[in-house]
Amino acid sequence: MPTRSDAVTRPLKPHNPNLISHTSFMHILVTSPIPSHPQDHGNRARVFTLCKALQAYGHQIHFVYSGFEGLTIAQECAMRATWDHTYILPLKTKKRPQSKRSHHLLDDWYDNAMTDCTEAIMRKWPIGACFANYVWCSRWLENVPSSIPTYIDTHDIFAERHQALKKDGITPQWFSTTKAEEGKGLNRATTVFAIQDLEAEAFKTRTHANVEVLGHLAHENFLAPTRIAKDTPLKIGFIGSTNMVNVRTFELLVAALQKHPDLIAKHRFFAAGSISNKDFARASNFECLGFVDDPKDFYQNMDIILNPNIGGSGLKIKSIEALAFGKPLIATHDAMIGIPTTQHYHSFKTIDDFCAGLAELCKSPDQIARLGKEGQAIFLEYQQRQQNTLQKHFPSENKGGATQALETSASEEHADA
């Protein structure tokens, strides 16, 4: 049976949608097929920071975890300590059914217990908004009263996802469906949040729901710039999890760097996050740091951050994280999709071009410093856009609340996706 946290809550009046929409806070029902803790993958960081921002606006979060990835005691304790109300469904099976040979049907991975749980919550609490993470975990929205606004945070585009990954030379994993199936799911919501502009445009062609862009929320945590003398060996870092896109990207990066032996000989390369625990990483020229408890410890020791991502979809949250720490970030075009930038060092088309650009950048301490400074301006403008969207849908008198919450929780968040 789903359980609720032992959080003390104030007595509430019976559900009145008209009243709730004008109160200073709402009870927001959020469902997720992934846990919010720890934030060691980009999707977990996304769920965590968005819910924390809503809390900072004064809203109460009813967080329902479907048990999709299992759960440790430590994870459960962390979630119960963070959210106002926490409901956890048991993991029934590790099987991931696929109804069609070439793709999944929309609800292949849906657990009907999610519907039972959310209906029980709505009967007991005056829910003011309903929020489903992932389109393939959205069927419960069909049972939400029409007076309550509903949202889907898409995270990614899943229509024909496997084909796109194969095109990029990546072995497909996880969920992939058709445009029609994805559209059917998106139509369950009043508003669909795309994580970046290109995906928003695609969603608009397959749903009648309102579609808007809500990127990743992160707190400004600019580190003091490192003074770099000319011809000084640099510390150059890559951080990532072991998802399929990161693994493919890292392998291509290691191979491309072999064409620049002087770069490898002169500077020190570091890998952090779960990817650095893998044999292929340990066999490379990168010094492997393993999982880092506090990302700040990693970033403050690096002179340049690498994100040579090739392919994939969604938003590359580790690009946002590097910019949030104010570090000089060199990136491919794919790594910056959804993050407006005109910076030359954020626009490389291939890994080979990326490595050539890195070799050029390493020769100029002044350019490294400018890159870090420009990245900070890019980050601040990006974050303001996300705050504006959030405030539009979840208004609060405390307009700085989301930023304050992300500041106080910055040490908790670690996205190595």
Image (tube, grey):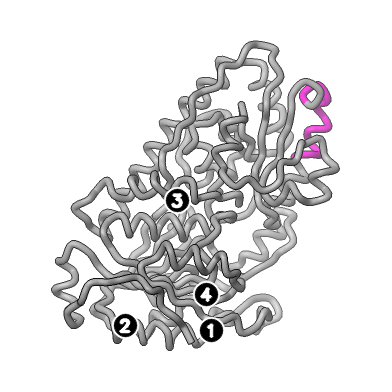
Q: Nearer the viewer, mark 2 or mark 1?
A: 2
Task: Residue at 45% x, 40% y: name it.
Answer: 340
Q: Secondary structure at mark 3?
A: loop
Type of residue at label 1?
Answer: Asp
Q: Which mark is residue 111?
A: 1
Q: Which mark is residue 136?
A: 4
Residue 208 visible? The answer is no
Q: Which mark is residue 216?
A: 3
Q: Quadrant of residue 25?
A: bottom left
In the image: residue 251, left or right of residue 60: right
| Frontmost residue, 233 versus 210 | 233
N-terminal-most mark, 3 or 4: 4
Q: Secondary structure at mark 4?
A: helix
Q: Residues within 10 Å of mark 4 (few under 14, many from 20)?
A: many
In the image: residue 65, left or right of residue 6: right
Q: CA distance from mark 4 to mark 1?
A: 10 Å
N-terminal-most mark, 2 or 1: 1
